[in-house]
Image (cartoon, rainbow, N blue to C red):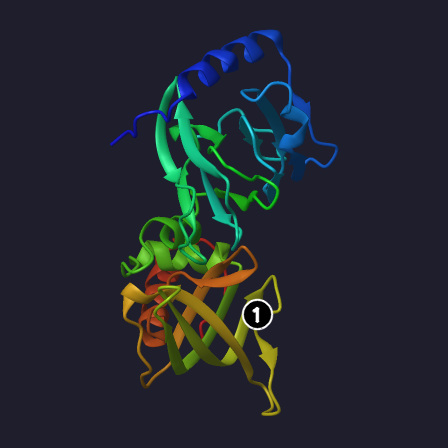
């Protein structure tokens, strides 16, 4: 359902067309991050400023927001098509002063409303669903307003990324598990030691005791005093209902905004079966010691 444009938004979109035709825009010297101030709009309160970023992750920080921003995101790799990309944004804790919309061919859809205080909430959408249009809301005092968020461009063509973003609570198929083992940011064998449910953040924090570390890109899992074992924490939505239990699992997942997010997590004995069946048929996408 598309939200109706806020007052004054249609003139901004008309201004957008003029800007696009003229090729005007504010390029950031840092291709991953942009920081700007609405105070430059004092004489033209309805200015629309273009921001161009070419990076897989970064941040936007707009101080004293007035007028509007159009944020153009591109990955830092050459590609003929971006249709397999998902864009995720995570507003800063105290972000305020502007609404964030998805804009496509002049139509607007509310993504983050000014004043929404959903802590740690991440908003994701397909790259082809539109771009980011950020409009400052009327304020009596803009001196303390800062609108900002982190962003990530995710390749949803991989099983781990697609599962984590689109359906984090759905059990993975055998194919998804085998692809996740090859493409995830971390892959470990271990057990659930404890689960802490954080109602305010709508998340569960899972304490993992791992006895086999296959791969990790960040130091999610740290060695323990017990020889040959690791400990780490993974987050997942509260709605998934994760509970402590017996037995070993194969935990896979990806890093999102500096946090480890759970992807596919079959029981280890089920993974061994999947892996053996695929290997016998020559269909396993990568080699990994399943024992």
Residue at the left extreme of this rendering: 1
Q: x and y percent of residue 53 in the render? A: 63, 32
Total numbered circles:
1
Residue at the right extreme of this rendering: 29
Residue at the front extreme of this rendering: 140
- Report the side of 242 relative to 112 (left or right): left
Quadrant for residue 223, please give it: bottom right
Quadrant for residue 235, please give it: bottom left
Front residue of this view, candidates 68 and 153:
68
| Residue 84 visible somewhere in the drawing | no
In which quadrant will I find the C terminus? bottom left
Front residue of this view, candidates 275 and 250:
250
- Report the side of 114 relative to 70 (left or right): left
Which residue is located at x 46 percent, y 69 percent?
A: 234
Q: x and y percent of residue 125 in the render? A: 39, 39
| Residue 219 visible somewhere in the drawing | yes
Quick check: 76 above or below 13? below
Q: x and y percent of residue 146 in the render? A: 58, 44
Quick check: 112 above or below 283? above
Q: x and y percent of residue 145 in the render? A: 57, 44
Front residue of this view, candidates 147 and 150:
147
Crowd rating for badge 1 (residues with CA inside 10 Å; few <14, some 14–19, many 20+): some
Which residue is located at x 53 percent, y 45 percent?
A: 152
Which residue is located at x 49 percent, y 80 percent?
A: 210
- Report the side of 211 relative to 124 (left or right): right
Quick check: 16 above or below 225? above
Task: Give the residue pinned by disc 1.
Answer: 220
In which quadrant will I find the N terminus? top left
Secondary structure, mark 1, is loop
């Amino acid at each position: 359902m598309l939200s109706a444009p806020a007052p004054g938004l249609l003139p901004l979109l008309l201004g957008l067309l003029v800007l696009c035709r003229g090729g005007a825009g504010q390029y950031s010297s840092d291709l991953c991050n942009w920081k700007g101030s609405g105070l430059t709009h004092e004489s033209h309160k309805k200015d629309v400023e273009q921001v161009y970023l070419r990076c897989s992750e970064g941040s936007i920080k707009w101080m004293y927001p007035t007028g509007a921003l159009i944020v153009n995101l591109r990955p830092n790799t050459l590609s003929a098509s971006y249709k397999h990309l998902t864009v995720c944004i995570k507003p800063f804790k105290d972000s305020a002063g502007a609404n964030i919309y998805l804009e496509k061919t002049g139509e607007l859809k509310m993504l983050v409303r000014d004043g929404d205080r959903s802590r740690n909430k991440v908003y994701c959408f397909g790259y082809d669903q539109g771009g980011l249009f950020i409009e400052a809301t009327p304020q009596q005092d803009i001196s303390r307003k800062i609108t900002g968020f982190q962003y990530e461009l995710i390749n949803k063509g991989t099983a781990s990324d697609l599962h984590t973003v689109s359906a984090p609570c759905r059990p993975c198929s055998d194919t998804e598990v085998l692809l996740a083992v090859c493409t995830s940011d971390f892959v470990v064998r271990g057990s659930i030691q404890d689960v802490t449910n954080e109602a305010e953040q709508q998340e569960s924090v899972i304490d993992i005791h791992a006895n086999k570390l296959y791969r990790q890109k960040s130091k999610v899992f740290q060695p323990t005093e017990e020889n040959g074992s690791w400990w780490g924490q993974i987050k997942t939505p509260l709605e998934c209902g994760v509970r402590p239990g017996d037995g070993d699992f194969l935990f896979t997942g990806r890093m999102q905004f500096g946090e480890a997010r759970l992807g596919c997590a079959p029981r280890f004995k089920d993974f061994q079966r999947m892996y053996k069946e695929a290997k016998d048929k020559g269909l396993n996408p990568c080699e990994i010691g399943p024992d």
